[in-house]
Amino acid sequence: MAGSRPEAQDHPPENGFTPLERPAPRLLPHIDGCVLPSLGGFGRHQKQLVVLTWIPALFIGFSQFSDHFLLAQPNGTCVSPAGNHSNWTGPPLLASGAPALQLRANGTAEEPGDSAGLLCACEERRLELQTGLLQNVVTKWHLVCDSAWKVHIAKFSLLVGSIFGYLVMGVMADWFGRHPVLILSALFMLVFGLSVAFSVNVTMFSTLRFFEGFCLAGLALSLYVLRIELCLPGWRFSMTMVASFLKVGGQLLMPGVATLCRHWPIGDDWQVLQIVIISPFVLMLPYVWIFPESLRWLLATQHYKRSKAMMLRIARKNQVDMTTEASGVLAELEQELHKKPQRSCIVKMMSTRNLWKNIVVLCVNSLTGYGIHHCFARSMMDPEAQPTALCHTDYYTMAGIAVATCLALCPAVGLMGRRGGLLTFMIITALASLLQLGLLNLIGKYSLLLRDTLNRKFSVAFSIIGMFSSHAVSTLSIFFCAEITPTVIRGGGLGLVLASAGFGMLTAPIMELHNQKGYFLHHVIFACCTLLCIICLLLLPEPRGQPLPESLADGETFTRQTLLHPGEQHLLLVKYERDYSRVHDTPLHLTATGDNGIES
């Protein structure tokens, strides 16, 4: 630079003005492009931390699917009929091998006129589980018949707690940092999760499950954000999908864990199961010392003093010489140490022009994906099958579909990108839903012979396809939001999308509470939402290969790419100046100017 100045003075510009030197571009805002590559990129330190975010994913899968075992509906057998049924001549209720009286999904019996209706009229009844446990919450406190609504309150409690946890913990992660939210969530997860196992009644159980869901949401959200912010653009999706596989692995292993707790000598087996799935979170307590704060969040919120110590630690673990490779970043960081930290909240999203629209679109996508997933799952179940078969077959079918979805997402997103993959799976979901609602009714109307044979087969086929695609839509919507939301409000933005997913999951216990009344209308509404989502998805940007936005200004510039090639779009915007000198005056113009064209 010093040698170029005399040369510039020897050859002054023609207009007589000396050019002003532009200030060097800042390096600190470009974390993916400058800061992380100067510290070794996705080096050994980052890989170790990502592995630490994978380990709790398996335990989170245990907790999220524990309701299928702790609150499973049992089979009922009437041991001592009421007095008004003492002369009943139906199937023997007291004899060995007597048929069990089946309960509905909402815990109530069938119509009072049949044999199953006698269960609620029995003075003494025996409840038997088919889910790997000998006793759970339903059988311990006899939550059937008139008390069946308490089971749905218990199911609501975990989901509602998760919804509030996503919203509150997301804001806290943006304000106080990811690390405090992670540690507090893990600590209180142990406290409330273990307390659930010692509940003395269903009210205490439901209350503690609410706080367990609250802490579980904070744990899942903070790990998700930390994992995204540790990775460079080329590693983000693959690292996230590994965590998704581990979470599904927890779902697949849950029946085996429940079976191992079946014959525990001390305490009820459902209490042992709750302790077993919560105790592994003890392994997260050392994260207080071994897991650092997100460097990306520290730089985005101008915690420059803490950032300097963090960068030196990362460079040392990645074996990077800071004096050569990161000298420019450190020099700029030294000049910014006097600045005070600036925190942001998700409320500032409302002052943006494009960002809030993108987040709202992804919230609707997540809500629709999880909501219609239950519609497909309900259509897949065979109402004539035995409860034992329903329990095991449907559970493993849903887990297998989740595994297939994760396997299909990897190549699909690699080929079509985030927006293309999300749009493709949403179109498949809409087609499966519309065909299930319309084609099956058409077959039953015009072909009575095929109605019984093909109706059930088509319904199961469309349900499996719909569950597959809707699960992909939900998973990809959450990841999409984590990529396009700026670092300063990433926790709050991701919390909104995850809370929307929780509202979609709430549709399952709501429909069970109403004994599946209004199920068809419920499915129609979500089918219409899929069509709306297809249109809105075209407004989203494509974040594949792009650096994560750090500030709100970065998020605003993160807009969708035009469908036209940049060269073609430039041609449409260029204004050409046409030469009208050879065009003669028209008679109308001559009349307006007063010249009749006759020479004097």
Image (cartoon, rainbow, N blue to C red):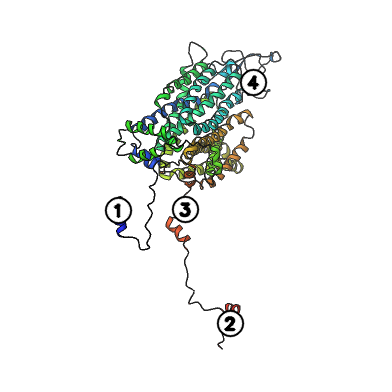
Look at the picture and state if 567 lies above or below 305: below
Mark 1 or mark 2, whichever is nearer to me = 1
541, 334: nearer the viewer: 334
Q: Residue furthest top?
A: 265
Mark 3 belongs to which amino acid? Leu
What SS does tag 1 mark?
Answer: helix
Look at the picture and state if 55 lies above or below 426: above
Q: Which residue is mark 1?
A: 4
Mark 4 belongs to which amino acid? Ser
For marks 1 and 3 on the same chain, the one whose residue lies earlier in the sequence: 1
Give the CA separation, mark 1 to mark 3: 44 Å
Q: Residue at x 47, y 35 (%)?
A: 341
Can I make out residue 238 in this image? yes
Give left or right: position of 179 versus 80.
left
Q: Which residue is mark 3?
A: 563
Mark 2 belongs to which amino acid? Asp
Give the CA separation, mark 1 to mark 4: 86 Å
Residue 87 appears at what percent x and percent y? 69, 14
What SS does tag 3 mark?
Answer: loop
Look at the picture and state if 446 lies above or below 289: below
